[in-house]
Amino acid sequence: MNLKKLYNKTLVKKDMKLILWLIVIATIALFIDLPMKNISYLGDLKYGFEGRFYGDIWKIEEAVNRASFLQIFMNVVLAISLGVLLIGEEKRKKTLDILWHMPYSKAQIYFNKILVGLISIIIPFLINSLIMIFMSITIKEIGDIYTPRMIIESLGLNIYVTILIFMFSILIGSTSGNSISQTAITLIFMILPLGLMVLFFGNLNAWGFHITMPVDDSPIGIFVQYTSMAMYLVPLEAYDTLGGDVMSRLICVGIYILSFGVIAYKCFKNTNMGRNGEVLAFKSLDKILLYGVTICSMMLLGLLLDSMLSFGKLGLLTGYVLGGFGGYKLTNHFINVSGAKN
């Protein structure tokens, strides 16, 4: 595949205009979480606020190790927002239909969206990481807290994980028909393997089958950790505590990224433009979504009623009935309503 032929300056410019505001917000948010903590620490150090700058050191170390909530939040929000703006919103507004009839190949449209997404992920993390590295080299007090290598490792993992979620969002966007369904389905599937395991073993225990949920070192536990994207959002230091080794987990991320990209392109290329604006872009997936949500709703509401009310098995059965009925009706309603609008 000739990358020069795939690259199109006009398409890149168009997509960059869509998401430029998001890059700016992400850069500012990460500046608050990373360099600003250094600046706060130096200010407290200068004016002798001893009771405060020890707390500042802890906050800086937390940020460097990717243990801060804001960084993890940005991994998810930036990735999904980019996927939604580049695919879901274009479908919802029908602008993708227009591109389809312009002198661009589907491969060009897809490739340039991915390129813009990758650039948009790298820029905010790179700018703030370079500021952090510069401060650690030029300011001794900062250099005593962390090294440039630590920042580079954190930068690499931040970008890697955000790209993983972005490519997954692109895959979901290529199979869904609008931005709302893309966002909801992406978030659900990010925790699906882990969530299903918790629901399954929780329901078994509720029925009296006291089977211990698989832990980190069991085959099922390791499989769930490797296939649940939410597990890749853990802080840098926590990677050593998870099942399996760090390198194999990082290799898995690379495989997922490539696989999501290839499958997403196949779906993007074959998407039914007539279903743009609907929940899913392929009618064959409607039933899978419908029954999947119904089953999960049954298990979830059954557990909730069992834990909240002292009705025993009656509470479980009531939860199954209400959850199944509600999940089926609600999902079916959204599928039918979105179809009727088209």
Image: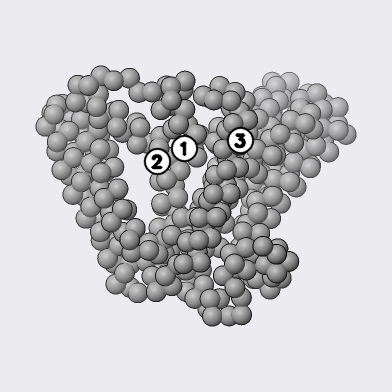
Q: Residues within 10 Å of mark 2 (few under 14, many from 20)?
A: some
Compare marks 1 and 2 and give the one earlier in the sequence. 2
Residue at (43% x, 64% y) in the render: 178
Tell me the CA gap for discs 3 and 2: 20 Å
Answer with left or right where residue 81 lies relative to residue 198. Answer: right
The kind of residue tagged 3 is Leu
Q: Residues within 10 Å of mark 1 (few under 14, many from 20)?
A: some
Query: Dot 1 lies on which element?
Result: loop
Question: Farthest residue toward the right?
Answer: 138
Answer with left or right where residue 121 lies relative to residue 179. Answer: right
Mark yes or no: residue 116 visible.
no
Instruction: Using the image as rendered, state which of residue 12 and residue 126 is in the foreground.
Output: 12
The answer to which quarter of the image holds residue 2 is bottom right
Q: Measured along the vertical axis of the image, is residue 159 above or below residue 43?
A: below
Which color scheme did the rendering employ for the protein? one colour
**Contact check, label 3 and label 2, Cβ < 8 Å:** no
Q: Measured along the vertical axis of the image, is residue 27 above or below residue 249?
A: below
Pointer 3: what residue? 250
The kind of residue tagged 2 is Leu
Pointer 1: what residue? 228
